[in-house]
């Protein structure tokens, strides 16, 4: 009994000592934080990839997201990030430009088919653990996303080490994404193979096909339309593997420098089966109004559509290397200078440069303005050519202007409200910060976009 009493006293002392010391260890996250984020995006352009590099690129997208960070104890934080992206797209609607609800097929107006809109949904869960001295942090995450023609499962983990009285930080992480296509194809290609190439049955039975001169062709003749290849893909996977390295150094009381680079390997079907390609060395065929064929590549064309020669085809591997630098400099109590540069290269022939500057301006204890500017340029992929400039003898080809040569300018302005004491409340949630930002994006190819984003961070009482 005496031994048992001694053990209980010792055990109680250990618990009391641990509790006493835990009071002095700063928690990684004091309270549960909830972020409500949203953005509204709209764009206009004339190089739609679904219609072979020409056509209306009008698109709108709204993306509400909720991020919840939960402290499990002093050292561990669980974060759940869930959101949706709901969009309507003139370009993707023309996967089926011959939809019954459309009076006249054209790449310059949206179809009313099922592909005109979609909802992407995704959720990510991450777990982060910090050591007692906060010099070592490891994390692990898992993610899932899906939309009507694509799904993705991802997982990864990382390790961060702090040295030199936390003035130096090294990070290493790895991620894997295992994706799968549920492919959708341009209507005319899909229908051609469903009918076994018979232009007198199925979709084509009641449709007149026109040649380049606007003449109705003899479907049983020798000069008829036919795709270059079967559009159906057999390898429906798209897997990505990445390793990321980061280094951060506090140079002095005013300056911090960061370096990071990634190694990314992709394998599988890396093309988009929705995107048409038209060849320069193949005769053109159309459905619609013959009088509009001479104006096909302009918005004057509102009632004729060119039948695809093939879908986009790209290599089944891609290796990417982005390298980035950041330098943040505290000028004074009012101004901070944030700069960023990234160089990117891959084995498809694309090389790009990104330069960005942001100058947060603290106009009061709670309000900060942050104007920004971003410049981007890139070379074209080896397989890119505009509408009607690819050739059928090539192994790979695309007319997706995201893979073209271009440069872009983005101007932004934002305002941020911060209250570290969370005096304002909504129910049991204290408002910690509110952010609102607007960005205007312009490519020299003609694509223009506007983005409005907003976020509110709450602390749960």
Image (spheres, rainbow, N blue to C red):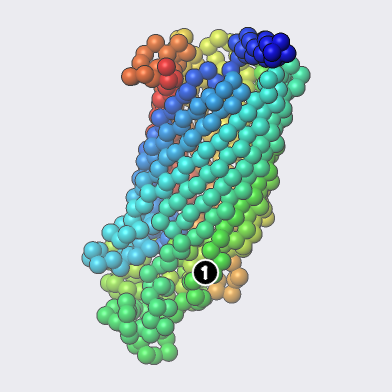
Is residue 264 at least partly visible in the picture? yes
Residue 12, placed above or below residue 384: above
**Residue 448 located left or right of residue 349:** left
**Residue 343 located left or right of residue 358:** right
Give the image location of residue 29, x and y in percent.
55, 21
Which of the 4 image quadrants contains residue 392?
Answer: bottom right
Quadrant where the N terminus lies?
top right
**Residue 211 located left or right of residue 313:** left
Give the image location of residue 337, x and y in percent.
58, 21
Foreground pick, 107 / 37: 37
For the view shown, which residue lies furthest in the right direction?
164
Give the image location of residue 315, x and y in percent.
62, 63
Is residue 351 at least partly visible in the picture? no
Which residue carries the number 1 mark?
233
Which of the 4 image quadrants contains residue 179?
Answer: bottom right
Tell me which residue sits at (45%, 44%) in the image. Answer: 122
Foreground pick, 319 / 302: 319
For the view shown, which residue lies furthest in the bottom direction?
221
Q: Report the number of numbered marks.
A: 1
At label 1, counting other C-alpha atoms closer than 10 Å, the crowd grade (few under 14, some 14-19, many 20 or more) is: few
User: Tag 1, which secondary structure?
Assistant: loop
Residue 280, placed above or below residue 92: below
Residue 16, placed above or below residue 257: above
Give the image location of residue 142, x and y in percent.
56, 43
Tell me which residue sits at (68%, 20%) in the image. Answer: 132
Tell me which residue sits at (47%, 48%) in the image. Answer: 145
């Amino acid at each position: 009994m005496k031994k048992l009493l001694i053990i209980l006293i010792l055990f109680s002392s250990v618990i009391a000592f641990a509790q006493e010391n835990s009071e002095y260890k700063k928690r990684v996250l004091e309270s549960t934080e909830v972020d409500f984020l949203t953005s509204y995006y709209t764009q206009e352009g004339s190089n739609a990839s679904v219609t072979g590099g020409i056509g209306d690129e009008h698109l709108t997208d709204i993306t509400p997201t909720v991020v919840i960070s939960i402290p499990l104890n002093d050292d561990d934080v669980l974060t759940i990030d869930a959101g949706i992206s709901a969009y309507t797209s003139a370009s993707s609607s023309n996967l089926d430009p011959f939809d019954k609800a459309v009076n006249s097929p054209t790449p310059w107006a949206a179809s009313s088919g099922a592909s005109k809109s979609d909802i992407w949904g995704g959720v990510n869960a991450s777990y982060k653990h910090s050591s007692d001295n906060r010099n070592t942090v490891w994390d692990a995450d898992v993610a899932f996303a899906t939309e009507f023609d694509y799904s993705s499962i991802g997982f990864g983990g990382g390790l961060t080490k702090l040295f030199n009285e936390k003035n130096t930080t090294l990070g290493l992480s790895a991620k894997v994404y295992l994706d799968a296509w549920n492919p959708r194809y341009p209507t005319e290609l899909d229908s051609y193979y469903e009918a076994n190439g018979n232009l007198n049955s199925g979709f084509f039975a009641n449709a007149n096909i026109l040649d380049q001169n606007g003449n109705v062709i003899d479907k049983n003749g020798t000069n008829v339309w036919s795709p270059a290849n079967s559009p159906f893909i057999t390898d429906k996977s798209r897997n990505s593997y990445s390793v990321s390295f980061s280094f951060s150094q506090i140079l002095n009381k005013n300056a911090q420098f960061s370096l990071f680079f990634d190694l990314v390997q992709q394998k599988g079907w890396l093309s988009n089966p929705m995107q048409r390609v038209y060849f320069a060395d193949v005769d053109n065929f159309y459905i619609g109004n013959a009088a509009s064929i001479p104006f096909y590549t302009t918005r004057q064309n509102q009632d004729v559509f060119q039948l695809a020669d093939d879908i986009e085809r790209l290599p089944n591997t891609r290796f990417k290397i982005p390298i980035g630098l950041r330098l943040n400099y505290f000028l004074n109590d009012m101004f901070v200078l944030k700069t960023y540069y990234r160089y990117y290269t891959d084995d498809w022939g694309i090389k790009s440069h990104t330069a960005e500057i942001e100058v947060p301006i603290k106009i009061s204890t709670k309000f900060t303005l942050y104007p920004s500017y971003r410049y981007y340029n890139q070379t074209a992929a080896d397989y890119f050519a505009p509408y009607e400039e690819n050739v059928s003898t090539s192994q790979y080809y695309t007319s997706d202007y995201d893979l073209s040569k271009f440069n872009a300018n983005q101007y932004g302005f934002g305002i941020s409200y911060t209250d570290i004491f969370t005096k304002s409340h909504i129910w049991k949630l204290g408002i910690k910060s509110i952010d609102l930002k607007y960005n205007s994006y312009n490519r020299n190819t003609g694509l223009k976009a506007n983005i409005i984003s907003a976020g509110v961070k709450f602390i749960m009482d």
